[in-house]
Image (tube, helix red, strand yellow):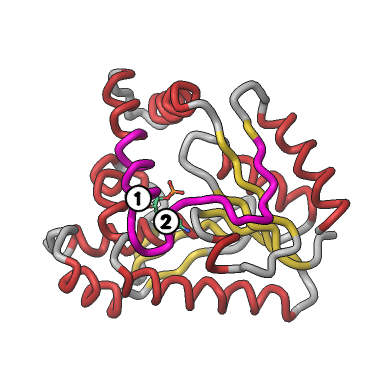
């Protein structure tokens, strides 16, 4: 079983979430979806009727949010207060607002602290954890034993996102999906606070032409060498 941290970063549509969960299950490790945490705060912001662009108001909501995320790879639970929000945090409304919310430094400060606590809790028991996000290798867990940065051609990423959306009953026109994926990546990569970028010591894996299983094989191989 894995000991220590595997940091898995990259933009959306790279297969990151699927790969992270499968990798954690395979390595007998826990799993932390940090994107879900930013999404829960975003849902709280929208439910409070706060403008996602109003950083001060967003920070106030973030300080009060009671969020829970599970660390079981098979059943990653997400709660806002007592509500199970696993479905609500994936809606277009949340997806469209999450980059603005996650660019607020106070939101990042609170969530990074929380993420480090969760990681420390898992490691204290001698276990391992696969952590996925945008800034895991650079900010949250700079000492991770293995850092992977997944990439894929933008057209491939948009196609994957589109397929995921239709499977979840939210089909949209390909141009719309492409525009939404491009917009979110641009916002995430250009923000001042912890922008999306590979850590210097991250292994970059281009998943454009790989199946999920092929990516998984490559990561298991890397984990067994460095994990
Ligand atoms: O991974 P997911 O698509 O669910 O992430 C949603 C959003 O949360 C990202 O587009 C990004 O704005 C933000 N995020 C982040 N830092 C992380 C994880 C996610 O800023 N570590």
Farthest residue, direction right: 225
Beta carbon at label 2 within 8 Å of ligand 1: no
Is there CB contact under 8 Å for labels 2 and 1? Answer: yes
What x and y, as percent, mark residue 16?
57, 42
Q: Quadrant of residue 101?
A: bottom left
Residue 105: which disc? none
Q: Mark 2 = which residue?
A: 195
The region drawn magenta spans 182-205
Q: Is residue 141 above or below residue 87?
A: below
Q: Quadrant of residue 30?
A: bottom right
Q: Earlier in the sequence, mark 2 or mark 1?
A: 1
Q: Is residue 217 above or below residue 72?
A: above
Residue 190: which disc? 1
Q: Residue at x 26, y 44 (%)?
A: 96
Measure the alpha-carbon separation of dots 2 and 1: 6 Å
Say what secondary structure mark 1 lies in.
helix
């Amino acid at each position: 079983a894995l000991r220590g941290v595997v940091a898995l970063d990259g933009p959306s549509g790279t297969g990151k979430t699927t790969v992270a969960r499968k990798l954690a299950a395979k390595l007998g490790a826990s799993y932390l979806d940090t994107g879900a945490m930013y999404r829960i705060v975003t849902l709280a912001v929208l439910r409070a009727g706060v403008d996602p662009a109003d950083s001060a108001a967003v920070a106030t909501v973030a300080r009060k949010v009671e969020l829970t995320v599970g660390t079981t790879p098979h059943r990653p639970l997400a709660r806002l207060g007592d509500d199970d929000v696993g479905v609500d945090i994936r809606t277009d409304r949340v997806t469209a607002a999450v980059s603005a919310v996650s660019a607020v430094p106070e939101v990042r400060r609170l969530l990074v602290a929380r993420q480090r606590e969760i990681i420390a809790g898992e490691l204290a028991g001698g276990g391992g954890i696969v952590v996925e996000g945008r800034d895991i290798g650079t900010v949250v867990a700079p000492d991770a034993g293995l850092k992977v940065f997944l990439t894929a051609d933008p057209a491939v990423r948009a196609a994957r996102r589109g397929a995921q959306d239709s499977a979840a009953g939210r089909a949209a026109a390909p141009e719309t999906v492409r525009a939404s994926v491009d917009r979110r990546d641009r916002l995430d990569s250009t923000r001042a606070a912890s922008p999306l970028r590979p850590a210097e010591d991250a292994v970059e894996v281009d998943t454009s032409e790989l199946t999920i299983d092929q990516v998984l094989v490559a990561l298991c191989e890397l984990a067994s060498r460095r994990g």
